[in-house]
Each structure stands twice: as structure tokens, then as C-alpha cells.
Amino acid sequence: MNTEYDHDIKACIDIMKLDGVILYPTDTIWGLGCDATNEKAIDKLFKIKHRDTKKSFVLLMTDVKQLSQFLANPLPDLDALINQFTEPTTIVYEGAINLPNSVLAADGSIAVRITTDPFCRSLIKRLRNPVVSTSANESGHPSPMHYSLIQQTIVTQSDYVVRWRQHDISTRPPSQILKLEKDGTFTKIR
């Protein structure tokens, strides 16, 4: 059992339950995150990033069962549609429900990535809510490919900085982004 890993998970959960923002490694790049159902924390995240509140965030979830709680009309074959991707993929879904407006796009859609990363999955399962995942940079600045490239202002404004994987300099590209259309097809966004 990794003590640093376990300590980070517990500290992240404690901070997120207190309206906090965490700086953490994801299945792609380092991210800023918070409880996706907590409006105070989401507001804080917008301020740290200097991000326009009209822009939405990506949400990390563990599986289709969790995702279905936040969609008004999930497609019956949603599991098969999502599981066809082998690389990290963020999918934009129409008709989001049960989430604060601050994480929704202007059209009421949400962007969700079902994460396979063990650290992120542990966070989400222990928190029992989706977690916001946005790149750990101020808007307009490059996304950091590993921890050492994160702006110091981002580090100091985070309520908790995960130690797990800080020394990992392997590069993981950002996820592809697709929009799920009503007919079950995808439109590539990035």
C-alpha cells in the first residue's frame, strides 16, 4: 500500500468536501479539480484559471451508471458507444441534469470523460460525485504536460497539491473531444 497515494486521496476528499480546489494528476495531463456538484468550489476554480464563466469544464466519472444519473435521455447502448475508445476520450452529451449550471455549456450539455486512471477513479468513488477536470493553467497559457511545468500561481492558489506522480515526466496528450449526436454518431471537436 502506497502511503503517499493514500494520504493524497484522503486529503483531496477532505478538501473537496470543504469547497476546495485540488491540483492533481489525471489520465491525461495535470488538472485542477473540485466536486462537480459544488458551486462554491466551481466558482473558485473559475477565479484561479481566470476563465470566462461562459466556458464549461470537463467532468470525470467512473462509469456509464454514474454518467446516466446526469443525463436526461441516455442512449440505451451508451456503454458500448463509450467502450469503443481505447484512448482517453471526452464526450459532449446533450441534456444534462442534476448538476449546477456553472458546469454546463450554454446549450445545457456536459463534457464527460470516463476515466480509467486509478487515482482519479479512487477520488470519484470516495467523493461519490463527479470531479471537475480542467488543465492546470491560467486560461490562454499552455497546458502543462507534467507537474514541473505548472505555473507557480496555480500551485499556490490550489487548496491541496497532490504529491503522487509529481516526479513523473512521461507525457500524456490531452483527450480527444467528441460530441455524441442524437442518432448515436460522433462529431469530432478535437
Image (spheres, rainbow, N blue to C red):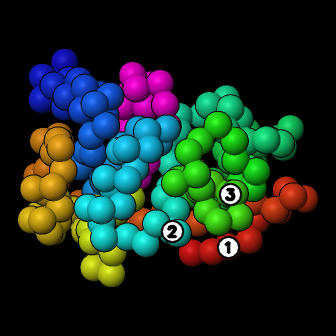
Q: Which residues are magenta?
A: 120-133
Residue 188 in magenta stretch: no
User: Marks 1 and 3: which is nearer the front?
Assistant: 3
Q: Is residue 105 above or below residue 125?
A: below
Amino acid type of the residue that numbered disc 1 sits on in the rendered structure: Lys
Toward the viewer: 145 or 54? 54
Label 2 sits on a secondary structure element that is loop
The residue beneath circle 1 is: 188
At x 12%, y 42%, the residue is 163
Please give left or right for residue 131 compared with residue 87 in the image.
Answer: left
Label drawn at residue 109: 3
Do we see residue 129 in this rendering?
yes
At x 33%, y 55%, the residue is 45
User: Measured from the top left, where is residue 160 in percent x and y?
Assistant: 17, 41
Calculate the distance from the C-alpha at mark 1 to the C-alpha at mark 3.
Answer: 15 Å
The residue beneath circle 2 is: 55
Toward the viewer: 141 or 98? 98
Disc 2 crowd rating (10 Å Cα; few below 14, some 14-19, many 20+) is few
